[in-house]
Amino acid sequence: MWRPILPCLFALGCDSNVETIDASPGRAEISMNNSWIQGRPTEVSFRWPNASICNFDDWFCRWPDGLTTTVMAVTCHGCTLLEDPTGTTAWSMTPAKLTATAITDDAITIDIALRFDATGDTQTVSATALGDHETALEADCRLIDVAELRYGSTAPDGGQVTSASAVHACGATRLPTQAIVVFPAIRTHRDQRYFPFCFPDWSCTTGWNEPLRPLSQLSITPAPAGWGQIGYSSDGKLVYFAAYPGDASGTIELSAPLLSGDMSSASVVVPSVPQRTSN
């Protein structure tokens, strides 16, 4: 049914039409990445919202006073807390956050004891993940027709995505019309393969607010002509490559520090272009 909202906004006594919703606890929630890599801080978010939600259908409702949640205790199994919110109080409807880092390759569990201050109810919420650690830098060589290659000079151009079907495995030789692209990635103990580097002027965190490393930490000699990207990997991430001109030759050397502090190296032998022989 249509409601005369605007006149009420300016009329005296409008508060008489406003109903304060019930201050009862809803379901406490916790959210975090299910894979933690040692040495990389990971953000955990949590909240204990009100059971009722004042939405656009509830034009004349308001939140009750004192609708807050207090963190009573945080326990981190298999991880170390970098930010401990114990004792802090925040509005119940807004997610609170903590930061921790893995110290194991095994199971990780976060337990957060919360109090819904409006009623005094308490509850402990938990979430689990698996720890992991970086083991090596890897680099894959691929070939692509020069006409199919799309890349930016300092970072991938989001509007210029190279088709995955245009990329082919490297062999000992290549055609004069084919360029070299190199896919650097970090391999982990649990056989993940990911690109943890951040291009200039990009937001340098993952979706879980985990920090990425500056691209300058990835050393590549000779330097590529630029960077590009192809489709998405099986876990929904864009795949990035270093692009080289058609006249590249020799060996491409790569190195980068792992989160453990150890340096790791990889190399790619550029396929040669067979010399034409005259009759």
Image (spheres, rainbow, N blue to C red):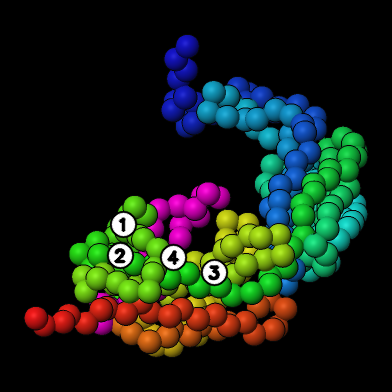
Q: Nearer the viewer, residue 95 or 266?
A: 266
Contact flag, marks 1 and 3 (Cβ < 8 Å): no
Contact flag, marks 3 and 4 (Cβ < 8 Å): no
Q: Nearer the viewer, mark 1 or mark 4?
A: 1
Q: Indicate which disc residue 144 carries.
A: 2
**Residue 186 picture quarter:** bottom right
Q: Secondary structure at mark 2?
A: strand
Could you tell me how far apart the alpha carbons at marks 1 and 4 are, in whole angstroms? Answer: 14 Å
Q: Is residue 94 magenta?
A: no
Q: Is residue 183 left or right of residue 117?
A: left
Give, as a three-letter code, the residue at label 4.
Tyr
Q: Indicate which disc residue 185 carries.
A: 3
Give, as a three-letter code, the residue at label 3.
Ala
Q: Nearer the viewer, mark 4 or mark 2?
A: 2
Q: Is residue 185 left or right of residue 98?
A: left
Q: Nearer the viewer, residue 129 or 171?
A: 171
Could you tell me how far apart the alpha carbons at marks 1 and 3 are, in whole angstroms? Answer: 20 Å
Could you tell me how far apart the alpha carbons at marks 3 and 2 are, in whole angstroms? Answer: 19 Å
Residue 215: percent from the left, percent from the top?
A: 49, 78
Q: Which residues are magenta?
A: 226-247
Which residue matches tag 4? Answer: 240
Please tell me how crowded label 4 is: few (under 14), some (14-19), or many (20+) other residues with Cα within 10 Å. many
Could you tell me how far apart the alpha carbons at marks 3 and 4 are, in whole angstroms? Answer: 9 Å
